[in-house]
Image (tube, rainbow, N blue to C red):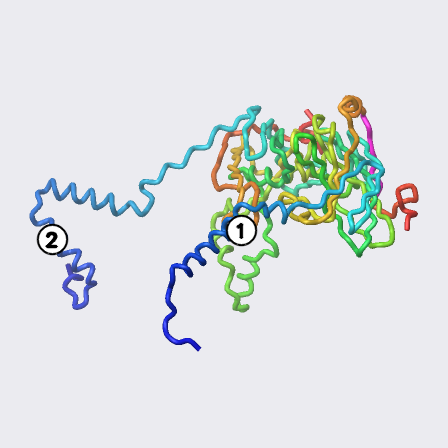
Amino acid sequence: MRHGRRRITWKGTALVVGAVTAGCALVTYLPQDAGVDTPFIVEGEVGETLDLTYAKLTVTEVRVADTLTGLSEAAAAGGTFVVVDATWRATQGQTSFGGAEVTDRQGRRFWPTNQAGCSTSASAQPGYAWRTTYCFDVPRDALAGATVRLARGGQSEDHAGQRRDAVAVIDLGITPSEVDTLWEAEETVSPEAPGYAPASAGGSEG
Amino acid sequence: MKHARNDGPDLAFRLGRRVVTAVADDMSTTQRVVAGVVAALVAISPFGAWNEVEPQADPLTVGTPVEVGPFEVTVEKAATADELGHLVPAPGNHMLAVVAHVTNTGEVPEYSSTIGEAIPAPENVGIIPEAPLGEPGTVTEAAPGTGDAPDGADPAASPSPDEPGLPSASVVNIEDGTSIRILNPGLTYRVALIWEQSDTFSGDVIPLRIMALEWIEESAGSLDNEYWLLLDEVAFAGQIPVEPAKPAPDADAGAQ
């Protein structure tokens, strides 16, 4: 056992200062945020079934509507409603799907309404397909090239709930030439209540 | 000078008095006055004497758009009605609606509560205060034997009769009469901000204020980031004319 004071040497000091500097440099210059935060994006299109590991997801249909009619109320769009029908099939356990957001080409984000029977989230047990309808009120210039982003994690606080998790981004398939027709059409949609999906929407699988 | 002769006067006081006497003895009257004024100025400094005067609120007028946080708000009018859709007043009251065009000019959705909170209920026009949950003040007074100390906030809130907890407005989309929750970017909604008002109010105008909203990128005090913080600062204020109640009440506050 050593007794007495340890000597502070130049070599030891240089080692400590060097180690601290190297640590600071690593923390500062390595893009660790991107590694920690970025979700695993699974891209697809309408009608395609996407595997998100925790669930299989199919966007079955995309419509637009000026008005949504539900059991107790009708909702009028400030712009136009993009109505997205989706089928969730949980694969691991009971899962809540809290993320639903439309993004346009300018990067603007749009959240769904809970009016007129539309859903803002879904929840399903494994073993069956669960049909959900999301309705997003968007302006005309958001239609062309818009995508819908669906996930189990929520999108509030800059997608904090979706970090390092699988997220589906589905192209709604709206081309610039279709925008005028879609915008001017006076459609009324009655969203179906969430429920077991029929065979046509992937309900007979598995 | 009675205190100064006491057995145990405060040491600081004694020292201070000696300094003042020593300094003032050699001074002329003018010097004493100047010294007194300087001492007074120094003394009031800690009490905010040199703080900037609060900036006055910008004028709020009907038909003029104003920027409020992520929103552009244009107040169209104020109107009263016996009932508005599912909002039915108690007997002796009616509903007061401020009709405004609200556009989310940002890139992310905002909750309608953000604009609801930024436009507080007009004061001193008979807006029915919020009923406190379980009437805490009344219960505490009626049961003095419980031994529970009343919550500090309750007695403080009750003395000002017109202030206590004026409710936030119900924000209704006039187009369809539903409560609107999300205001998506790039969209303009014609909304009614609705409060319950006493029938005793008979004025032609209401004083309307819009509070300032500040963007918080990274909060120093909490874990929440990136949100609009409601400031205790009036950004816009003005008198909004009130249209009288219509003979046929309707869900649509702005049908005319």
Q: Is residue A95 above or below residue B168?
A: below
Relative side of A109 to B7, left or right: right
* Residue lying at 20% horizontally and 42% vertically, measured from the top left: B37
- Chain of residue at mark 1: B
User: Residue B21 at x, y = what percent?
Assistant: 11, 53
- Chain of residue at mark 2: B
How far apart in space, not on screen, are marks 2 and 1 (Cα)?
53 Å
Q: Would you name the residue on which mark 1 appears?
A: B222
Q: Is residue B196 visible?
A: no
Q: Residues within 10 Å of mark 1 (few under 14, many from 20)?
A: few
The residue sitting at the bottom extreme is A1
Q: Is residue A106 magenta?
A: no
Task: Write down the quadrant of residue B17 in the picture.
Answer: bottom left
Q: Would you name the residue on which mark 2 appears?
A: B21
Relative side of A203 to B131, left or right: right
* Tag in front: 2 or 1: 1
Query: Which badge, 2 or 1, comes first in the chain's sequence?
Result: 2
Three-letter amino acid code of the residue under disc 2: Thr
Q: Is residue A187 magenta?
A: yes
Q: Are marks 2 and 1 in contact (CB under 8 Å)?
A: no
